[in-house]
Every structure is written in C-alpha cells, then in structure tokens.
C-alpha cells in the first residue's frame, strides 16, 4: 500500500506529478491511499517555475483532452476523494477503455462529472456574483472583492478576470487565497486578511437604485430567483439586502398600477 | 455623479423594465489584445453571465435603460407615450457611457442594453444612441456587450452605423399584425419595420464573410444579429397568428430571437387597453412552441391544431398526445429527429443518448442514472430491457395524469 499526501490546494500539480510516478511504477488504484494535509500552499495550474516532470499528456499514454479538462475541474472540488477518483479514472482510461469517458452511466465517470459540474457551476457563480469595490491605492484606482467560493474556484476563474479586467488593478480575496493583478503581473497570497476590503463604494448606490427599479412587482417569482441565486451567495452581493423589502412592497406597487389604470 | 443621476436612473430603468429581451445574446468571443494598454471587457462566447436575479426571477445581465422616456409617439401600450403623465428624464451621452463603464468595472453587468423614446425626431434620437455606443467602443475600448434598440423610421445610414458598434440590434414589431398596430401604435408601420430589418439583415450577411476578395476582414457588424419583441394579449391576435408572424420573422428577416411579453397593466394606462394582465402561462407556452419550431424540427401545423396553444400541456406533450401512434419510440434505434419528439427529452439529453448509444445499449438502469424524468417518459419509450405496457398509451386517463397544477397563475398574479 502506498500513501500519498497532497499538501496544497487545489492540489492539481501535486496530484499530476504523483499520478505520473504511480503510473510509471504501475501501481494500481486500489493500492494507493490519497490524503491531503491541512496546510495550504500555492498550487496554480502551470505556475511552476522549477523544472517539473513532463505532464501526463506528454507521456507515452495519450490521454484525451476532454478527460484532462474534467480532471482540471474535478480536482478543484473540496471533496478529498477527488485525488483517488481521478487516478482511478486515469488508470481505467489507459488500461481498460480509452473511451471510458463516453460511458456516461459508469459509476466513476458519473462521480467525476458530478464533481466537475459542481466546480463549473461554483466557478460560474463566482464570475457572476463577485462584486468589486473601488479604493484609491497609491493614488490609482484599485478594485477589491471579497468572495467565498464553495470549491477552489478562484483557480478556474483567474483567466476570466485577467482577460475581462486586464487594464484594471484589482485584488480578489477568498478565504484560502488572494489574487492581485496590477495590469501585467499576477501575485498570489495565501490566507489573506479580509479586513483590507472596503465596506462601501461610490457607485454602489446607483447599482442598488437600478436593481430596485428594473424588477416587475406584478410578477413575483421568488423560487425562480432562489434557484438561480441561492441565499448562500447573498452575503457578497449588496443588492440582496433589498430583496425582502422589494417583495413586501410588491403587492402594493402592483395594485397601484392597476388602480392607476382604473382611474381613467 | 450626484443625486440627480439617481433620479434619472430610477425613471429610466423603471421605464425599460417592460422590455422582455433581457438576456445578452451570443455574439462570439472578444477581448482586449495582449498589448492593449487601455480598454476593458470581454465577451466569453455563449450567452452572457447573469450577474444577479431580481425577485421576479429574471436575470440581470445588462444595464437596461432608456436614454430618455420623452416620446413624440403615442403607442397605447407604452408608459412613455406622449399622452402619458409619467415623469420624464433624459441621460446625456456621457452619463450613459460613465454609468455603463462604472457598472462594468464592478462586475455588475455584461454590457449595455439601450433603448429610447423618440425625442425631436427618429434621426436625432438614433444619432445620440449611436454616439453612446461609439464612445464606449472607440474612446474607451469597451469590449463588453452592446444591444441597441434601433428607432423605427430612423435613416438607414444611422442604422448601418449602429451595427458597427453594437453586438445586437433590434426593432420591436410590438403587434403581430398591421391592424393591431393601427389600433395600438398608430405611428408605427409594419412595412417600415420589415424594411429596416431587411436592410440590417443584408448588412449582417455582408459582414459575415470571412474575408473580402482584397484579403481583409470586414469590420464586425452586429455579430449577435437582430431580435424583436411582441406584446401578447393586449390585442386579440391568436397564438396561430403570433407564431405565424414569428416563423416569417425567423425565415425572411433572419431574426435571431423573437421575445414574447405578456401584456401587463402599466401605470396611467390608455383606454383601449385591457385592464387585466395576460396570463403568464400563455407567454410561457409561446416560448416553448417557439423553441420547438427553431430547435426541434416541428412545423407550425404540428404544434397548433387549432388557433390557440393547449394551456394544460406543454406543446410537445400536446403533440405526443395527439400522435400516440408514433410511440413508443426505441431509444436505441430512433434517429435524432424522432428522439427530439419524445416528451421529457431535451436536446442535450438527446445528444447524450446518441453518444452513449455508440458504445453500449441503453437500459432502464442507464436512464435512472441519467436522472431522466422517467414518470413522464415511461409511456413513450422502449429500451433494451423495457417497453411500456400497451394500455399505458391507450387508457382514457392517460391525458389526465399529465395535467399540471396551475402553478403559473398562482405565482404569477
Ligand atoms: S415609440 Fe417607443 S417609447 Fe415612444 S410611445 Fe411608442 S413604444 Fe413608447
């Protein structure tokens, strides 16, 4: 039995190196115990300055790109079983069935999909619900956001934020890691201090005004809203503080429209 | 920015909310170049991100505002018509541009959806709108999404210029027929609206070619295409007339999307309008039917067997109930078009089934693993180890079991 301890989050690179070694030694999945240590260390995809061993995709086993993409997402999940699962799938793709991934009803594939999907959704929500607030740093505009993803989604979305807000200076803080961007370079910082986040922003009042006014009080569909924007996300979004009042007043507002209509 | 702006924003976002076409459409990908030192934004491909949701369940993706709600026209269904007593406001070009950029930088929105009442003349109005889009694109290098609602009767030149900066252009047809327009929007003319759409259609097609013969890429022109909106239930047009109009707009004017908006009473309403809102379920059924027409290979006659859609069942199920002889369908053998006709199977699931089928035969167990709505599917399908009892499709109670509770009315009104 071999025990492998992953010491970083999400642990993608470490897993990759370990998996490659295990494959080289032909250790079957059932003979490996994967565990993770508590400590948190920077482990960004491709962010490896030292010489790293060849990535899996360059080894003599050719792994379909679609599988590697799934691994990338699944390995950002909180679930500690992700390391063992990905190795098992890797093993089976190489030695049992290179089309394994097409078997959407295979237990392992279903589990892998479930993890990958959860991360994808979490990452999407991060790109949607994260809110920047403006501060002046060294007399320049700087934007800061605090966001609590459910998984290690920061890693997935860094590309998105760097592309979209390329010429802006910004910092995104999550409970486990922060990313700072100065329009050219990305710097990562583990366990950042949330107290640097501002509590207000000069534009926010306009956003709140907008949010209150585009909603149609004659058509309350609270459940539809909640399924797309569950309460767990609310604390990062300033506009959600208005929702209860908007719903309470909606009846009166809608009725007023009809009464106004009747007055003619 | 000061508080006058808040007041304007209140008025001009409130006035825009009656427009249903909220989502940003697909307009390909776009981002700043590696060496660009200015500019902001990106299009990620696919439909835009929903940055928030309001208690009416709608997605907030764009800053959707009117440039102004002053208007010289008198469309009855519209709160901004000249005869309405609503409070008026107008954004300047700079205010609109700044608001868009400031919202975008805070990750509130994907871009701008700008429409407007008509001030002065259609051309004067359209010109200001184009200036806003141009300033965003040229002065600020804005790479986010821009949707302009073009002004009916504005000059073709201005519409053409709008297409250079906007990702999507739209003109609302509002009513499915000219007689209804005459009654509810006397200044609007269906022929002129179609003409505008046709001009834009040609422009869009012209710019779509990959390279011109001189080897240069033509500039982007409204890559997200055109869309329009119809108000449902203000006039007495049937679903057949409405969907017939849509089919024509899709095939002749090559529209990307037709939106349906159930009429809902507006403050200070005009006398020709009904007092009660149109049922939301009707709007919902129209969207379902529209979807079947565009993506599921159904034609109009199949969907409608009389003038109105069945409100009790979704249109696909209604078709299946009228065509029981087609079922059950073998999931392991049927071709794609047939699979798409099975109630409870969406296009994505069909794609999945086709992929799995290449490697293995589908069994009942596979269906449960895929978490399909088996209760609904049961009577309509066969798989390797299951076929429905003959009486399932024949029984008289069959239809009843699909009757849905009238949720929509409950939550809607
Ligand atoms: S032209 Fe537009 S803004 Fe003016 S009244 Fe008609 S619908 Fe309303």
Image (cartoon, coloured by chain):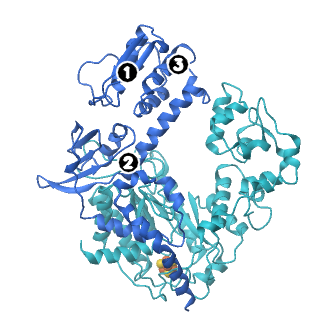
Chain colours: A blue, B cyan
How far apart, in angstroms, are the residues tagged by discs 2 and 1?
26 Å
- Tell me whether marks 3 and 2 sit on the same chain: yes
- Look at mark 2 in the image and give the residue it sits on: A127
Who is closer to the viewer here, B399 or B166?
A: B399
Q: Residues within 10 Å of mark 3 (few under 14, many from 20)?
A: some
Q: Residues within 10 Å of mark 2 (few under 14, many from 20)?
A: many
Q: Which mark is residue A16?
A: 1
Q: Position of residue A257 (x, y in %)?
A: 52, 81
Q: Which chain letter matches label 3? A: A
Q: N-terminal of the two: label 2 or label 1?
A: 1
Q: N-terminal of the two: label 3 or label 2?
A: 3
How far apart, in angstroms, are the residues tagged by discs 1 and 3?
15 Å
Tell me, yes or no, if residue B341 can be seen here.
Answer: no
How far apart, in angstroms, are the residues tagged by discs 3 and 2?
32 Å
Q: Is residue B126 left or right of residue A134?
A: right
Who is closer to the viewer here, B240 or B206?
A: B240
Tell me, yes or no, if residue A117 can be seen here.
Answer: yes
Q: Secondary structure at mark 3?
A: helix
In the depicted structure, whether residue B397 falls above or below residue A38 = below
């Amino acid at each position: 039995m071999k025990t492998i301890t992953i010491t970083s989050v999400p642990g993608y690179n470490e897993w990759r190196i370990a998996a490659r070694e295990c494959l080289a030694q032909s250790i079957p999945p059932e003979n490996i115990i994967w565990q993770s240590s508590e400590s948190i260390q920077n482990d960004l995809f491709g962010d490896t300055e030292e010489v790293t061993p060849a990535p899996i995709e360059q080894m003599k086993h050719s792994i379909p790109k679609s599988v590697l993409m799934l691994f990338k997402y699944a390995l950002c999940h909180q679930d500690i079983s992700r390391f063992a699962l990905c190795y098992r799938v890797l093993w089976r793709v190489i030695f049992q069935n290179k089309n394994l991934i097409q078997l959407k009803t295979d237990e392992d594939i279903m589990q892998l999909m479930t993890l990958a999907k959860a991360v994808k959704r979490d990452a999407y929500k991060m790109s949607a619900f994260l809110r920047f607030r403006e501060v002046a740093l060294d007399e320049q505009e700087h934007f800061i956001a605090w966001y609590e993803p459910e998984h290690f989604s920061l890693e997935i979305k860094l590309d998105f934020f760097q592309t979209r807000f390329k010429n802006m200076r910004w910092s995104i803080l999550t409970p486990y890691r922060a990313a700072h961007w100065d329009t050219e370079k990305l710097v990562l910082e583990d366990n950042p201090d949330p107290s640097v986040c501002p509590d207000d922003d000069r534009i926010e009042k306009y956003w709140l005004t907008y949010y209150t006014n585009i909603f149609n009080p004659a058509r309350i569909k609270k459940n539809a809203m909640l399924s797309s924007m569950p309460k767990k996300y609310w604390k990062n979004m300033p506009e959600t503080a208005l929702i209860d009042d908007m719903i309470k007043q909606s009846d009166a507002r809608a009725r007023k429209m009809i009464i106004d209509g009747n007055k003619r | 920015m000061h508080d006058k702006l808040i007041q304007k924003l209140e008025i001009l976002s409130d006035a825009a909310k009656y427009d249903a076409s909220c989502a940003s459409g697909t307009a390909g990908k776009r981002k700043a170049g590696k060496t660009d030192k200015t500019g902001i934004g990106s299009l990620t491909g696919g439909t835009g991100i929903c940055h928030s949701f309001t208690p009416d369940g709608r997605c907030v993706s764009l800053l959707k505002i009117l440039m102004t709600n002053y208007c010289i026209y008198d469309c009855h269904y519209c709160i901004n018509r000249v005869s309405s007593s609503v409070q008026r406001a107008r954004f300047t070009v700079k205010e609109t541009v700044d608001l868009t950029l400031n919202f975008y930088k805070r990750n509130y929105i994907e871009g701008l959806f700008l429409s407007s009442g008509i001030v002065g003349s259609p051309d004067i109005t359209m010109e200001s709108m184009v200036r806003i889009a141009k300033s965003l694109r040229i002065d600020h290098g804005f790479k986010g999404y821009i949707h302009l609602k073009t002004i009916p009767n504005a000059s073709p030149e201005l519409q053409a210029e709008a297409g250079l900066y906007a990702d999507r252009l739209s003109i609302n047809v509002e009513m499915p027929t000219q007689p209804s327009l005459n009654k509810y929007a006397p200044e609007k003319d269906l022929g002129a609206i179609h003409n505008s759409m046709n001009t834009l259609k040609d422009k869009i097609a012209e710019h779509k070619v990959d390279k011109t013969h001189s080897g240069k890429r033509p500039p982007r022109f409204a890559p997200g295409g055109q869309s329009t909106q119809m108000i449902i239930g203000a006039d007495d047009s049937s679903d057949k007339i409405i969907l017939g109009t849509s089919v024509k707009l899709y095939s002749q004017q090559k529209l990307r999307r037709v939106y349906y908006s159930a009429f809902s009473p507006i403050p200070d309403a005009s006398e020709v309008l009904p007092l009660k809102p149109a049922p939301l379920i009707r709007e919902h059924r129209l969207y379902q039917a529209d979807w079947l027409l565009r993506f599921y290979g159904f034609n109009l006659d199949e969907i409608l067997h009389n003038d109105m859609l069945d409100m009790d069942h979704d249109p696909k199920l209604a078709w299946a109930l009228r065509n029981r002889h087609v079922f059950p369908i073998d999931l392991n053998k049927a071709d794609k078009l047939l699979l798409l006709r099975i109630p409870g199977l969406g296009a994505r699931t069909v794609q999945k089934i086709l992929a799995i089928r290449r490697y293995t035969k589908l069994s009942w167990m596979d269906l449960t693993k895929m978490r399909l709505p088996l209760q609904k599917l049961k009577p309509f399908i066969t798989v390797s180890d299951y076929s429905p009892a003959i009486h399932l499709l024949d029984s008289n109670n069959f239809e009843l079991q699909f009757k849905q509770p009238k949720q929509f009315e409950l939550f809607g009104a």
